[in-house]
Amino acid sequence: MAYRSGTYVAFHANGQTEPTESDIKYYNLLKAWRANPDYQFRFVDSHEKTGAIRDSSSRATVAQSLRTRLNNSKNMILIIGQTTREDKDWVPLEIEHAIDVCEIPIIAAYPGYSAISDPGALSQLWPGAFAARIAAGRAHVIHIPFAKQPINSAIVQFSHEAYPLGGGLGIYSYQTYLDWGLA
């Protein structure tokens, strides 16, 4: 494995290139938080560590590039929106490689929530590859709302050398959400 310092971000693009029409808007928000000098939000974006992928690239080329990015990652943010479970293409490949090969923790970030206390109640949103690995006890996951403080904390706290507690159903405490002003 290569030097693993990056955070890989996975989301369902839903075949869209328009940034407001898919979950790519959340990835773009992460980049905006990182770029804002007034925020204490920093991460190494694994997508920026390798060359860009062209829309005309072959499936094999895209898959190899995604695997290379994951191999250089210490953790993965999986943005779980209303359509993520419908992705049968890249998100399952990213989940499988992240968990089965790279053994990195997953930061499951859910837009539209202020706190996550029972991740199992959100299982209807999970892609099959994710649900299967949680059920098999193979995934190390922290389930959080898509919000700056929980995401920043998880990026800093969890890596291939430091997994969240709770196996596939890890959560932050109610007190932590109170401290962040989210509960």
Image: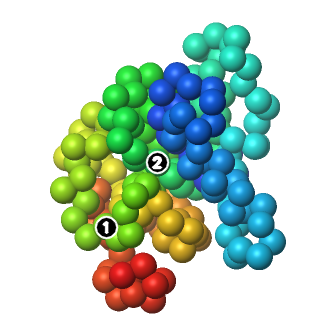
Q: Type of residue at label 2?
A: Leu
Q: Quadrant of residue 44?
A: bottom right
Task: Tell me the tag on residue 78.
Answer: 2
For residue 133, above or below residue 32: above
Q: Is residue 169 left or right of residue 21?
A: left
- Badge 2: few (under 14), some or many (20 or more) residues near its Cα, within 10 Å? many
Circle 1 residue: 116
For residue 85, above or below residue 122: above
Q: Residue at x 63, y 56 (%)?
A: 30
Q: Type of residue at label 1?
A: Ile
Q: Position of residue 171 (x, y in %)?
A: 32, 70
Q: Residue at x 70, y 54 (%)?
A: 31
The first of marks 2 and 1 along the sequence is 2
Query: Is residue 22 visible in this depiction of the protein?
Result: yes
- Badge 1: few (under 14), some or many (20 or more) residues near its Cα, within 10 Å? many
Camera-side residue of 100 and 183: 183
Q: Position of residue 134 (x, y in %)?
A: 26, 48
The Cα–Cα distance between marks 2 and 1, rounded to whole angstroms, is 15 Å
Q: Which quarter of the rendering shows the N terminus?
A: top right
Q: Which quarter of the rendering shows the C terminus?
A: bottom left
For residue 130, above or below residue 58: below
Q: Quadrant of residue 38?
A: bottom right
SS at circle 1: loop
